[in-house]
Image (cartoon, rainbow, N blue to C red):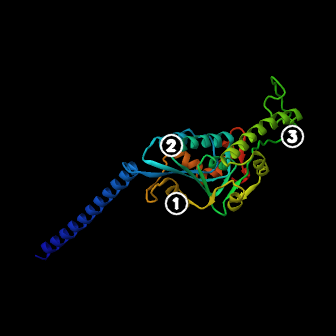
Amino acid sequence: MPFETDQYIDRRRLKRGLTIWRVVAILAVVGLVVVTVGRNIDFRGTDYVARLSVFGVIVDDRERLAALRRVAEDDRAKALIVEIDSPGGTVVGGETLFRELRKVSERKPVVAVMSEVATSAGYMTALGADRIFARAGSITGSIGVIMQSADITGLLDMLGIKPEAIKSAPLKAQPNPLEPFTPQAQEAIRTVVLDFYELFVDMVAERRALTRDDVITLADGRVFTGRQAVDRGLVDELGGESEARSWLAESFDIDIRLPLRDVEIEREDEIWREFLEGPVGKVLFSERLRLDGLISLWHPDLW
């Protein structure tokens, strides 16, 4: 009898344990389904305010542009908030993002919200919005363009290395660190840099309703705090996301209670991109190595 009683108790204990694990498994499956459905539906059938995050160095990004076009075409997206925390990037990257935001603005209001840094191409991006907000401590401005190179011919001479090149014309492949940067080459590159600079100045004058002379006084490469930028007309007002939502409610009657939905950028190389843009990637690969052409960037060596 004692043996049978012990067996009975063990069976009850085992059965109770299995029941608990079954309940835990069911709850886990239900939770996974809820999360998956929530991520995939993304407020399907309801209105929302879209939010695009522009972080780090700005380069031409086809997937991001495609995502913005989807936002523009989605009637449920009542507005777009662009959160910017970027020191800048390539001129093409900033210009393309600026123009795409203007296209979105043709169909719904666009608001830029500056975080810690929104300089150079980051500021150019903000110009694409209908309203620009910045924190008092945000750093912005740095309106200008730069091309950098280095002349290492003296070092090569010390090492006994003499580079040779056969070129179709003297200005081909200039600037080139393997040969002196001639005055003729400097002047040719300067005209290119100044042409991009004129483009940037025209953007600021048009979008901020400033005279060209006023913009030029501000476009000497200097940076401004958020408060200084407001005083100079480069930014509309101080604030963040909540102030942006209030402005949308007051100016366009967009319900401040509408859910905020992050713009999803579909990438085939998402895993590798996350690795390269994460802490490990930033240590192994400088973001400057990915910049093509002229850059509009504030303190590139620090990023």
Judged from the image, the secondary structure of the residue bearing numbered disc 2 is: loop
The reply to whether dot 3 and dot 1 touch (C-beta < 8 Å) is no
The mark that comes first in sequence, 3 or 1, is 3
Residue 266, percent from left and from top:
49, 43
Task: Identify the image quadrant of the N terminus.
Answer: bottom left
Marks 1 and 2 sit apart, C-alpha to C-alpha, by: 20 Å
Tag nearer the camera, 3 or 2: 2
Left or right: residue 164 compared with residue 237: right
Marks 3 and 1 sit apart, C-alpha to C-alpha, by: 64 Å
Number of numbered markers: 3
The residue that appears at 44% across and 43% down in the rendered structure is 74
Left or right: residue 37 compared with residue 88: left
Q: Which residue is mark 2?
A: 107
The reply to whether dot 3 and dot 2 touch (C-beta < 8 Å) is no
The residue that appears at 33% across and 53% down in the rendered structure is 33
Q: Which residue type does callout 3 highlight?
A: Leu
The residue that appears at 78% across and 39% down in the rendered structure is 194
Q: Which residue is mark 3?
A: 159
Judged from the image, the secondary structure of the residue bearing numbered disc 1 is: helix
Q: Which residue type does callout 1 highlight?
A: Ser
Task: Report the residue that reaches farthest toward the bottom.
Answer: 2
Q: Of residues 246 and 115, which is closer to you in this image?
A: 246
